[in-house]
Image (spheres, coloured by chain):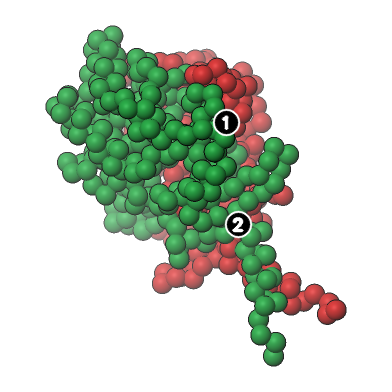
Chain colours: A red, B green
C-alpha cells in the first residue's frame, strides 16, 4: 500500500562526467553538497537514487564517434522491430541486447560532446549494483538505485523515462492477491513501479538542465535488502510479444511467406 | 526547465463515489479535510490535481452490469489491434473511441461493486475541464487537472498510468529548440509530461488503498491559464502508427492479401 508523501528532488552539483570518472564519488559529492544546502535531503532508509543512464555511459567510456552512429545502432541491434523512412532520415525501432525496444537501439546524440554519441551501458543492472554498493558504503542507509533512459512508446506522443537498471528496488509491484476497495482480489495488476519512479524523477531532472540524478523519497515499500533481479525482469519480449514486428514488417513477411509456400 | 522539489500526496478522505455524485463537491471536501490535517497541503497556484478515471466514470454513471462486459468491450472498440487467447480467456488490445489503445478497451472490473464493470468516461477532457472549473471556483488558485487510467504497454512488463483527460496542463513539454548541456539543440525530445505526472501520482494513490486523487506540486511550469487541447493530443494513432496491428494480425493480413491478388 502507499501512504505518506512522495518527494523528489534533483541535486545540481554533479559536474559533467567523462570516461573514467568515479561516478560514485561524483554522486556522493553532489548528494553531500545538496544535503548541506537542504539538511532534510540527507539520504534516509528507503530513498531511491535515480541516475540517468547517460552519466553511467560516460563514466564507463561508452562514448563513440558520431561518424560511427549508424554502425553503432546496427551493432547494438539484436532484432529490427520496425523501420520508417521520413523527411529527416530513417527511424529504426529495434530490440537491443538489453531487451529494450527503442529508436536507434538507445544510441544517443544529446548531452554528449559535439562529434560523439553515447551507447547505453553494457549492463545497467550491474552498474546499478555498483552504484548502490558505493552509495550504501558512503551513507550507511538502505537505499535503492535505478538507472533510467528515455524512450517513446506506441500509440502515445512524446517520451517518458524507463528503468533500465535497478538494484535494491522491487521493480514490479505485484498487487495480485490484494483486495480492492470492494474486497475483491485484484487479479490483473502488476504495477511497473520502477518505470513510474523513473518518470517521477524525470519531472525534476529534465533534459536541458544538467541534473542527471534525482532522489525519490516515499517509495520505501519497494526498496529491498538484496540487490534483487534488477530491471531485466521488466523486459517483455519473446513469444509473449504481440508486437514483435511492426505492422508493415509483419504484413510484408506474411505476403512473402504466402507466395513462397510450395504450390499445391 | 525543472527546478525545485516535486511533492505528491493523496488525500484519504474521498468516500466511495456512486452515479450522480457531485464529484467536485467530494473532491473539495476531501482536499479541505486534508488541508486541515496538513496546512501545507492547501492548494496553491501551479498544483496539478490527478483524478483516477474510475471515480469520474462512477460519478458520470458509466457503470454497467458485469454480464454485459464482453459486449461493452465490443461497443467501445473502434479497431481491434491485437488479440491473443490464453488460459484465462482472450486478451483484446483495441483502440477505443478516445484513441486509447489498451486491453479490453479500458472496460474495468476492479474497484467497482460486485456485478458491475466501469466504462471509461465518455469525454475525459470535458470531465477534466469541469473538475478544473469547479475546483478553481472553490479554491481560487491556478491549478491543472488530469484524469488518468492504467494501461500495459508493449515490450514492458507491468502497467503504468497515463493521462486520458487534461485541463490547464500542457501535456507535452516540447524541449525541441532548447539546448542541451553542450549548447546543442535538443531536436528529438517532446516529453509526455502529463503521463509522467500520472505515473508519479500513482505511486501515492495505489490501486488497493482507496485514494483516487493526488495533488502534484512542483510542475507549475506546465500549468496553463487556458484549459488547452486536453489529453487527446497525446494520442498517436493513424498513418503514423507503426503498430496499428499486432504482428500476428498483420502477418495474417499480408498472407491473405497475397493469396487474394489477381493471378498473373
User: Which residue is label 1 attached to?
Assistant: A189
Q: Nearer the viewer, residue A31 or B221?
A: B221
Image coords of residue A67 (percent x, y): 50, 66
Near mark 1 (Cα within 10 A), the count class, few <14, some 14-19 or many ≥20, is many
Residue A192 against residue B103 in the figure, above or below: above
Residue B262 against residue A85 in the figure, above or below: below
Image coords of residue B19 (percent x, y): 37, 27
Find residue B177 and report its image quarter. bottom left
Near mark 2 (Cα within 10 A), the count class, few <14, some 14-19 or many ≥20, is many
User: Which residue is at 51% across, 33% downward?
Assistant: B65
Q: Nearer the viewer, residue A127 or A115?
A: A127
Per the model, the C-alpha gap separating discs 1 and 2 is 22 Å
**Split into 4 quadrants, where in the image is the C terminus of chain B?**
bottom right
Q: How many marks?
A: 2
User: Which residue is label 2 attached to?
Assistant: B246
Q: Is residue A175 at all visible to an observer of this figure? A: no
User: Which residue is at 55% across, 44% downward?
Assistant: B71
Does A208 sit left or right of A159 as displayed? left
**Split into 4 quadrants, where in the image is the N terminus of chain B?**
top left
Amino acid at each position: 500500500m502507499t501512504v505518506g508523501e512522495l518527494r523528489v528532488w534533483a541535486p545540481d552539483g554533479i559536474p559533467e562526467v567523462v570516461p573514467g570518472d568515479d561516478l560514485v564519488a561524483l554522486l556522493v559529492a553532489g548528494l553531500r553538497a545538496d544535503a548541506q544546502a537542504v539538511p532534510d535531503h540527507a539520504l534516509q532508509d528507503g530513498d531511491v537514487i535515480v541516475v540517468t543512464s547517460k552519466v553511467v555511459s560516460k563514466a564507463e567510456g561508452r562514448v563513440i564517434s558520431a561518424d560511427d552512429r549508424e554502425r553503432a545502432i546496427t551493432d547494438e541491434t539484436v532484432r529490427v522491430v520496425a523501420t520508417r523512412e521520413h523527411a529527416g532520415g530513417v527511424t529504426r525501432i529495434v530490440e537491443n541486447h538489453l531487451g529494450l525496444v527503442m529508436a536507434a537501439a538507445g544510441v544517443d546524440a544529446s548531452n554528449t560532446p559535439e562529434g560523439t554519441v553515447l551507447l547505453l551501458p553494457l549492463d545497467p543492472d550491474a552498474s546499478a549494483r555498483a552504484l548502490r554498493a558505493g552509495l550504501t558504503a558512503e551513507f550507511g542507509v538502505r537505499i535503492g538505485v535505478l538507472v533510467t533512459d528515455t524512450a517513446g512508446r506506441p500509440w502515445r506522443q512524446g517520451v517518458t523515462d524507463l528503468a533500465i537498471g535497478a538494484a535494491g528496488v522491487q521493480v514490479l509491484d505485484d498487487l495480485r492477491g490484494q483486495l480492492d476497495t470492494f474486497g475483491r482480489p485484484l487479479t490483473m495488476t502488476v504495477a511497473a513501479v520502477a518505470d513510474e519512479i523513473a518518470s517521477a524523477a524525470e519531472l525534476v531532472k529534465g533534459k536541458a538542465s544538467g541534473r542527471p540524478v534525482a532522489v525519490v523519497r516515499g517509495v520505501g515499500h519497494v526498496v529491498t535488502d538484496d540487490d534483487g533481479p534488477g530491471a531485466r525482469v521488466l523486459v517483455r519480449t519473446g513469444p509473449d510479444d504481440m508486437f514483435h514486428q511492426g505492422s508493415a514488417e509483419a504484413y510484408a513477411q506474411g505476403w512473402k511467406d504466402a507466395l513462397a509456400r510450395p504450390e499445391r
